[in-house]
Each structure stands twice: as C-alpha cells, then as structure tokens.
Amino acid sequence: LRVRCATTATARCRGTLTLRERLPGRGRRTTTIARASYSLAAGTRTLTLRLTAPARRALRARATLTATTTVATRQPSGSARSRSRRVTLVRRR
C-alpha cells in the first residue's frame, strides 16, 4: 500500500497502517490481519504488509478478502490524523 507525506513537511511523518477484517470462526468481531509502522520523509513510499496466519488461510479458502485499511498518522506538528478505506486483497495464483 502507498503512503504519502506532504512534500512541504520539514520533519518525518510517522504513523501506523492497520488492516482489519471479519474472519471465519470469529463471529461478528473484526480482527487485525496486518499492521505496519512507518516513518518517512516527504514524498510517497510503498509499504509491504505481512498477513497473519488466519488471514492467509481465509484468503487461500476464499480467493479474495475485503478489509478496512486505517492509516493513523502523527504529523510533525504533533496533530494526529486518521483515514480509513476498504481494499480488496486477491490471492496470488
């Protein structure tokens, strides 16, 4: 997934990227299926996330997973910001 820090930032942007989804056998509760922290200078960077074992099993069984991605960022000024989006994960062939 791509993460961007404003090109006008003078300090590094720091944050956490989290993927959450309801997995089979867990009821209606959402589970964190991947998480990564980042610290980047101005510009765009691609983060690679490793799925948890239950998420890999579910992806193998279903071929696709639709997860919620949440990016929580702490700006250099100290303010916090969070954004969420739905993404579809597709099993490799």
Image (cartoon, rainbow, N blue to C red):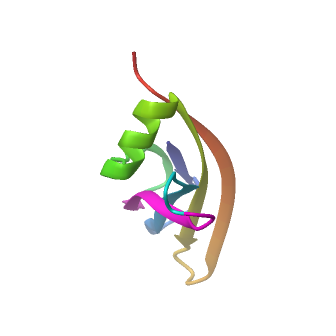
Using the image, determine if residue 36 lies above or below residue 53. below
Q: Main secondary structure of the magenta part?
A: strand
Query: How many numbered marks, from 0 up?
Result: 0
Extreme bottom residue here? 78
Please name whichever residue, 33 or 74, is drawn nearer the observer in this view of the structure. Answer: 33
Is 29 one of the magenta-colored residues? yes
Residue shown at 51% from the left, 51% from the top: 24
**Left or right of residue 12, residue 65 in this image:** right
Q: Position of residue 68 (x, y in %)?
A: 62, 54
Work out whether residue 80 or residue 86 is closer to the camera in this orientation and state it. Answer: 86
Q: What residue appears at the point 53 percent right and 75 percent down from the top-left corner?
A: 74
For the point 37% across and 47% down, the residue is 49
Q: In the image, is residue 82 above or below residue 80?
A: above
* Residue that sits furthest to the top in the current view: 93
Q: What range of the chain is rendered magenta?
A: 27-40
72 or 50: nearer the viewer: 50
Which x, y percent locates residue 84?
67, 59
Query: Residue 92: in sight, yes or no?
Result: yes
Assess whether residue 64 is covered by the magenta stretch: no
**Left or right for 35, reference 5:** left
Q: Position of residue 29 (x, y in %)?
A: 58, 68
Q: Is residue 89 above or below residue 35?
A: above
- Quadrant in the picture for the C terminus: top left
- Whether residue 17 is visible to the viewer of this picture, yes or no, is no
Could you tell me residue 43's position as x and y percent? Answer: 51, 47
Please name the residue shown 36% across and 48% down the image.
51
